[in-house]
Amino acid sequence: MPKAAIDINNLPYADGDFFAFEQLLSAKEQDRLAEVREFLTREVRPIAVDCWNRAEFPMELIPKLAEIDLVSPVRRQGYSNLFAGILHAEATRADTSIATFMGVHDGLFTGSIEALASKEQQDAWLPEIYSLKKIGAFGLTEPLGGSDVAGGTRTTARRDGGSWVLNGAKRWIGNATFSDWVVIYARDVDDNQVKGFLVDTKTEGYSAVKIENKISLRTVQNADITLDNVVVPDFFKLANANSFRDTNKVLKVTRLAVAWQAVGQQLAAFDVARRYAVERSQFGRPIASFQLVQHQLVQILGNAVSSMGMMVRLSQLEDAGEAKDEQSALAKAFTTARMRESVALGRSILGGNGIVTDFEMAKVFADAEAIYSYEGTHEINTLVTGRAITGISAIV
């Protein structure tokens, strides 16, 4: 007798949460997650591939993101870091580019203001930042400085009376082609310390040029920024951003967010590969019936679950105020390595269809490369962890 048709819209373990980690969230957080998941399914995922193909950001989405109110779930809305992490994974699962837009505006930019600005500065700036009336960017990486930017920041800041004058260049700055503000980290020529400044992108001497020809996160509008004698009033110097140690307070938290993105990317690979395996028939039956395909799907799921388990515990430590830099580094290195394997397996399951964005997996596969590299490369995060467990630095 022929087998009954499989309902592809009602597959088991639809959320991919095989070990039910989401049950650790409060009832309020689970309800909120369901609300945002429905929004992402309705508003983001349907447009994701088209925006990626055109390398254009859907500006019409910003008011909708403002309405769903996703900015600063922990500090402003009182949710747990665990909820914030799972939420970021869900956004990535829908579209890595939109999740990265939010990660830049919310995690890096807003996180800089929340962690390093004075109360007076926060009161002046945060309302429009939270409401997405002002879009932000985060200017740290430079054309000649990535992994060594802590000690090698070349952009300079010079005090001039009641203002600061910034000169230099930044690269790979997400959102910067259309952001209203950008936090620029620059080295004070007087004391050689890295300090933070909120720069209005309309200021004379500031320019941002879109980076073209990317193969990853094409929807994200990364830019090369040039600062040519940009004058910043003293009020716009972040009061508590006075050394790279201060900057690292922001990066520790956002490194967690990127590791959660690696979880979301694996869940996306699982979604697309499993659905394809059930729908696609070869040799007269769905390819999901073949042992090797099931093995690949289970490997993707296992990678995602192990990554999620690590991130759940790390988020709990962050909620308790006990998370350490080296733990964030290990999480970023481990989850992105598993992610790379998972998206490759997913692409393999789709065969030739895995290299065209029509079937979504090619976008998932390509976007993983950006996650693997930003917020500290796999190699640097590995060495940060190695230094913690040996007491010996292999970086310098």
Image (cartoon, rainbow, N blue to C red):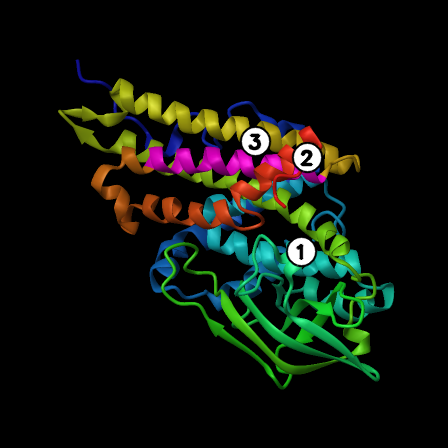
Answer with the quarter of the image where residue 280 lies. top left
Q: Secondary structure at mark 3?
A: helix
Q: CA distance from mark 1 to mark 3?
A: 29 Å
Residue 150's disc is: 1
Viewer-closest of 152 and 113: 152
Mark 2, Cα crowd under 10 Å, few <14 / some 14-19 / many 20+, is few
The stretch of residues the image draws in magenta is 325-346
Residue at the (46%, 24%) spot, across then down: 302
Q: Secondary structure at mark 2?
A: loop
Examine the residues drawn in magenta and state their main secondary structure: helix
Residue at the (54%, 58%) spot, across then down: 101
Residue 345: % across, % down: 34, 33
* Earlier-in-chain disc, 1 versus 3: 1
| Residues at circles 3 and 2 in contact by the CB criterion of under 8 Å | no
Residue 371 vertical placement versus 243 (above, below): above
* Earlier-in-chain disc, 1 versus 2: 1
Instruction: Name the amino acid type tagged 2.
Output: Ile
- The residue that label 2 is drawn on is 392
Instruction: Name the amino acid type tagged 3.
Output: Met
Query: Would you say residue 391 sits in the magenta stretch?
Result: no
Please name which of the two marks, 1 or 3, marks the residue nearer to the observer.
Answer: 1
